[in-house]
Amino acid sequence: MTWGWVGTRGTWATESARESMSAMAKHSVTWTALAYAALQPTPFSTEIDVDAQPTVTDDEVIWAIREAHSLGLNVCLKPVVNVGDGTWRAHIGFFDWDVPGEPSWTQWFQAYTRFIVHAARIAEAEGCAMLCIGCEMVRADGQEQHWRQLIAAVRQVYSGILTYNCDKYQEDHVSWWDAVDVISSSGYYPIDTWEQQLDRIEKVVAQADKPFFFMEAGCPSREGSPMLPNDWNLSGAASEEAQLEYYREMFRACRARDWVGGLMLWDWPAQLYSADAAARNDDYCPYGKVAAEFMSQQYATWTGEAK
């Protein structure tokens, strides 16, 4: 389960954050992705404000790692870049080749590498089992040489497992899977297409000969969301049954494929709503909803496979 997104300063390393993570761990969760974002002003900016508000501080990140470890959870540290003007990070992009006087991929990757290598040092010092080096960077995915250079820099300071979280439908469009240890993607697929998408992804996994899991997956508890699980702005009434329906199909389809190593579900906030508000909550978190018990049962019985 992903915990703590988007990593807003002041919301981690609190008693309510401790209670939230503890509640998550009680649902048979074995891994958590501690996810936080640093901002760049626009999709064409080449500087990332890693130390600025509202990003969590290093002390907060270290607190979350240690708290997760104290609960017996394996930790994947997941630093992510977001865009301050609201543009989705998938649209960060520059000319395919560097042009004098124009912002470039080279400049951006220099800033991004500093951000990721800094996180890698924390992950190494705190014993994180996995580090995610990027999330849904669709336009950047094609910059193979830059990614290979970043990964080489990360491996100089981090000895754990490396993964990259590509976006949905992009699993077969990344040319450098050989450079990471584990393939992962965001599995926000319409409820009636799971078999089709798994057939497609299976070919990628077999060709790369790498382990695979869904770094993100899930569905809001909202009417209509099972067909558009990636649309957090979809209009519709709160519906626990819609989320449960999606979870049932997602777990059924994934557990039937022995090459799917697991599901890192999206998501569990650091500041958790009260249990009596769950029926009115229409977001991704399953806490207090019927999907939570189902998820817990699935995780508790997902034996013989990587979790």
Image (cartoon, rainbow, N blue to C red):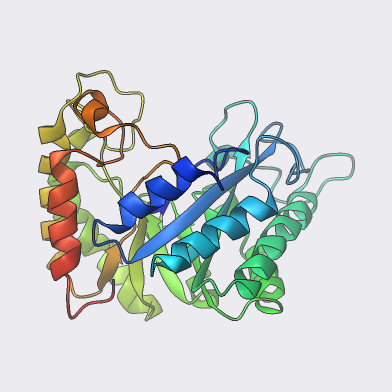
Q: Could you tell me if residue 177 is visible in this image?
A: yes
Q: Position of residue 223 (x, y in %)?
A: 17, 25
Q: Position of residue 57 (x, y in %)?
A: 68, 48
Q: In which quarter of the image is the C terminus?
A: bottom left
- Would you place residue 93 above or below residue 132 in this image? above
Instruction: Find the residue positioned furthest to the front.
Output: 15
Q: Residue at x 39, y 67 (%)?
A: 73
Q: Could you tell me if residue 77 is visible in this image?
A: no
- Would you place residue 103 above or below residue 295 in this image? above
Q: Residue at x 60, y 71 (%)?
A: 126
Does residue 36 appear left or right of residue 27 in this picture? right
Image quadrant in which you'd find residue 202: bottom left
Q: Which residue is drawn at 45% across and 58% down?
A: 33
From the viewer's side, name the closer residue of 79 and 144: 79
Q: Quadrant of the N terminus?
A: bottom left
Does residue 269 appear left or right of residue 123 in this picture? left
- Would you place residue 92 above or below residue 80 in this image? above
- How many numbered circles does the render carry? 0
Q: Position of residue 200 (x, y in %)?
A: 26, 61
Does residue 90 appear left or right of residue 157 in this picture? left
Does residue 180 appear left or right of residue 39 in this picture? left
From the viewer's side, name the closer residue of 28 and 156: 28
Q: Where is residue 296 in the image (x, y as percent from the top left)?
A: 18, 57
Instruction: Find the residue positioned furthest to the right.
Output: 101
